Amino acid sequence: MHFNFNFSAAEILWTLSFAALLVLLVVLLGRDRMRRYPWFTASILLITFRMVANRLLFNKLAPLTSSEVFLALADVIFLVSLLVVVEMARRAFARASRIAWIVGALAVAGIGVAVLALWGPWPSLKTALAGSTLAHLRLMQLVAQKGDLLVDVLTVQLCMLVAFAGRRFNAGWRSHTQQIILGLSTMSVAQLIVRALWQAIERSAAPHSQAEYQRIGDLQDKIINANTVVFFAVTLWWIVWLWLDEPGSKSAEALPANDLPADELPMEPAPEMAPGVEPDQRADL
């Protein structure tokens, strides 16, 4: 008996990733994590929406309209991702002093800007600010690409800071904040590796036949699929950790009354005050 299995690896990974995102959203809403991490939740919603839009609208709109829609969405996702980095940093270093915050933020931002300036080509100012529609689309694409690179570099730096100093402040190893940052940095490292690999391929590849073009295309598909596998694994990681309660939280520490120490047993209700008895004459509870 033979089964007709006509799904490609990309389609299977897309389905698994989309289902995992839906489950993650259910966890964020059902376990009340959205209140603590609103920008992270917003970023997951936007990524889910972009996946659906790509599936439903790709190659079904006019090329110009499609470029405008998806580039605008990419720019919005970049801005929200930047706010996610700030949100995670505030959660991780909630107990840091203002001076430490300013020094750390300037150092991380300086490294991020330096990497952004040195990694990859930049168009001339005249080309970027040209008044044509095509120039505007190229500018939107530049903002999305360079913005994603900046977010990836900032996220990796934040993860390193949290790994070395998070426990000292407000982000221990099993905290939700550190688990989210760890997942974000894993995806950022994967994105940086993909970016570096693809730039190396573009510099070294010089296809002269259809077979060589096909081989480069197949390699690109494999790189994209590997990146999708990382994304899927990170989403599963978030689902598990965000479902569990943090150590030290009220839910995690809830125990049956008989298992509590004597000094932590629930107190009896306070007796009603008898008429004519002054407040300071009541027995201590």
Image: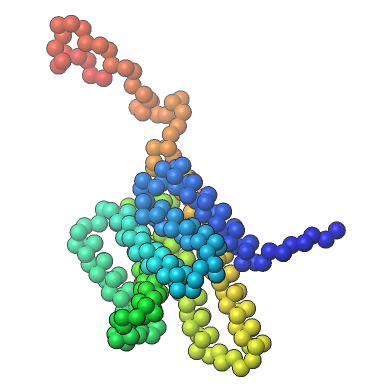
Q: How many marks?
A: 0
| Image quarter (top left, top right, bottom left or bottom right) of the C terminus | top left
Q: Position of residue 16 (x, y in %)?
A: 59, 57
Q: 222 or 187, which lies in front?
A: 222
Q: Position of residue 189 (x, y in %)?
A: 46, 70
Kindly identify the residue that appears in the image at 32 percent across and 54 percent down: 91
**Which quarter of the picture shows residue 162?**
bottom left
Residue 206 visible in the shown view: yes
Kindly identify the residue that appears in the image at 36 percent across and 51 percent down: 38
Residue 148 visible in the shown view: no
Kindly identify the residue that appears in the image at 67 percent across and 87 percent down: 211
**Which quarter of the picture shows residue 115?**
bottom left
Kindly identify the residue that appears in the image at 41 percent across and 53 percent down: 41
Query: What is the image's colouring?
Result: rainbow
Q: Position of residue 255 (x, y in %)?
A: 45, 32
- In the displayed orientation, state which residue is furthest to the front: 62
| Image quarter (top left, top right, bottom left or bottom right) of the N terminus | bottom right
- In the displayed orientation, state which residue is furthest to the top: 275
Q: Position of residue 134 (x, y in %)?
A: 39, 79
**Which quarter of the picture shows residue 222?**
bottom right
Question: Horizontal placement of 159 versus 107: left or right?
Answer: right
